[in-house]
Amino acid sequence: MTTLYRKYRPAKWSDVCDQDHVQKTLQNEIVLSTIAHAYLFSGPRGVGKTTSARLLAKAINCTDRKKNSAEPCNACTSCIELNAGRHIDVMEIDAASQTGVDNVRENIIENAQFKPTKSAYKVFIIDEVHMLSNHAFNALLKTLEEPPAHAIFILATTELHKLPATVISRCQRFHFKKISYEPMLNRLRKIAQEEKISVEQKVFDGVIAKSDGCLRDAESLLGQIFSLNLKNITARDAELMLPSVNHEIVLNFIKHLTNGEPREAVNLLHAEIHNGQSPDQFALTLLELLRALLIIKMSNSTDLYRSDYSDHMLGELQNLAKNIAQTTLITMIELALKRRLDAKTSPLPQLPLELLAAEVVALVTGPTMPIGSPEIEKKTSIIVTPPKETIKSIVPTTKPSVLATTIEQIHSKWASLIEKISETNHSLTFILKMCTLKRLEHNLLVLGVPYSFHKEKVEELKTKRVIEQALHGFFQEQVLISCEIEEAVTAPPTADLTSLALAFGGEVVD
Ligand SMILES: [Zn+2]
C-alpha cells in the first residue's frame, strides 16, 4: 500500500504545507531566473525539505512552465519523469547511506562536470548531508567553490550544526520550521476527504499532538489509523494507535489540583485508568502539560506550542498559566518527575499519581489552612488541626521579642492576613500558605518555607513590604519579616493521609 506521505506528496508549490517564508523566496527566484548554485535546507525531519528540493528541481527543468509562474506543469516529459522518480538529470543521494568519499566523487563531483542530458539543469539533492565524511565534504566543497554553470546542489539536513562552516557559507540557506496546528489539521482533513473517510476531530488532535510538528509522522500515523478499514473513525477506534492521553482530561486534572479539589482529581484519574489508560502515559502527559504551562508562563507566549495544540487548548493553557504561581508550577513539576519514577517500582501503578494529587493539593491549600472545602469536611467528619510542627515552633527563642504582639496573635490572624494580601497580590497567596510561623525574634517575624525559591520570593523587597504593611494593618506595630528554609521538603505526612482520605471519601482513623 502506498503510504499517505508518498501518495499526497505535493506536486506543486501551492500544496506545500506551512513553509510560506521559504516558498515565496524560492518561487521568486524561479520566476526571475535568479537561481543559486547551492542551497541548504535545514530544519526538523518530515516538514517538507526534500519535497521543496524536488519542486525546485521540477520547476526549473519544466519545459512547459508558464511565464511569471513558479509552478511546474506536471504534464511535460521532464515533470512526469521527475514525479516518477526517474529523471535522468535530477539525482537524489541519501548521505546517510553513502558516506564514502568515493561515492560523492563518483555520483556528484564527476557527474556534475557533464552537461545535462535533456534538461536545462542538472540537480543534485543530497539528503542528510551532515552524514558525509570530512573527506567527502572537502571534495564537495571544491565543486561548490567552482560549480559548473548547469549544476545545482540542494543540500538538506536536520543537523545544521554538524556541517562545516565552509560548506554552509557557500550555500543560500533556508530554514524549515515545524508545521503548526492549523495547517497540519487542514492537510489531514483534506487527505481524509480525498480518502472518503470521516474522522472525529479528537483523532486529528491526537495525531497532531503525537507528531510534534512533523507532517510525515502525522501522515504516517493517519495512514495506520486508516488501515483499520473503517469509513467512520472515532477516538475510540483510534485508541490503540494513539495511546496518548486526552490532553483536556489531564488539563482538568491539573485544574482540580490547583483548585484544591483532590476528590475530583482522583476520580478523574480513576476513570481514565478504568478506561484502559496507563498511569505512566498519564504521568507523562501531565509532565508535558506542566512543562507547557511553565514555559507559557515564563515567556508569556504560546508560540512554542502552536504545532502541538489547538487554539482552544492554547487559550486554556494560557488562562491556567496565568492563575498558577510560577513557584507552584516548579514544585508540581518536581513532584511529578519524582512520582513518575516511583511508579516504576510501585506495587500499585496508580498510587504515585494519587500521592502526587494529595501532595499538590496540600501544597496549594497550605499546611496552615484546612484542607478541602468545608462541605467535604462535614461529610467525612475530619477536623484538621495545624500540623504539630507549626505548634512546636511557637516557642520563644534566644533573642526575646520587643514587640507587644505575640506569635499566637499573629498565628490566629494569619489566614485573614493572607486573605487580605491576596486581594491585591494574588500571586503571593500560595507562598504565604506555604509559610509556617517559626518565632518572633526582637522585631522580626521568622517564617519557615520548604524551598530556597520560596525564601527568595518572600525576601524580595517588594514582597517583604507587602507582608510587613499587612502586619502593621492588623497589629498596629512594625513587625519585620525574615525567612528560613525548613527541613521538610514536601507537605507533612499527615496532610498526605488526610487529603488522600478525602479524595477517597474516607477519613483518617488515629
Ligand atoms: Zn513540466
Image (cartoon, grey):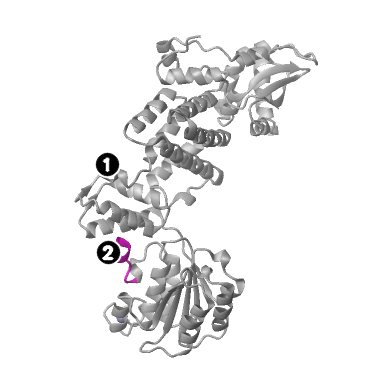
State the image coordinates of residue 460 (x, y, percent, origin top left). 69, 33
Left or right: 150 with respect to 221? right
> Which quadrant of the structure image shows residue 9?
bottom left
Q: Is residue 292 above or below residue 114?
A: above
Where does the magenta region start and end? 1-12
What residue does disc 1 label? 236
State the image coordinates of residue 29 (x, y, percent, origin top left). 44, 78
Cα separation between marks 1 and 2: 25 Å
Q: Is residue 459 above or below residue 205?
A: above
State the image coordinates of residue 439 (x, y, percent, origin top left). 71, 17
Q: Is 9 in the magenta?
A: yes
Determine whether the beta carbon of the residue marked 2 sits less than 8 angstroms from the nearest atom of ligand 1. Answer: no
Determine whether the beta carbon of the residue marked 1 sits less than 8 angstroms from the nearest atom of ligand 1. Answer: no
Residue 505 vs residue 339, the one in the foreground: 339
Which element is circle 2 on? loop
- First reached walking from the N terminus: tag 1 or tag 2: 2
> Which quadrant of the structure image shows residue 467?
top right
What residue does disc 2 label? 2
State the image coordinates of residue 373 (x, y, percent, origin top left). 45, 18
Residue 18 vs residue 85, the one in the foreground: 85
Viewer-nearest of labels 1 and 2? 2
Asked if residue 435 can be seen in this view, the reply is yes
Q: Quadrant of ligand 1?
A: bottom left
Name the outermost residue toward the right: 399
**Amino acid of disc 1:** Arg
Q: Residues within 10 Å of mark 2 (few under 14, many from 20)?
A: few
Q: Residues within 10 Å of mark 1 (few under 14, many from 20)?
A: few
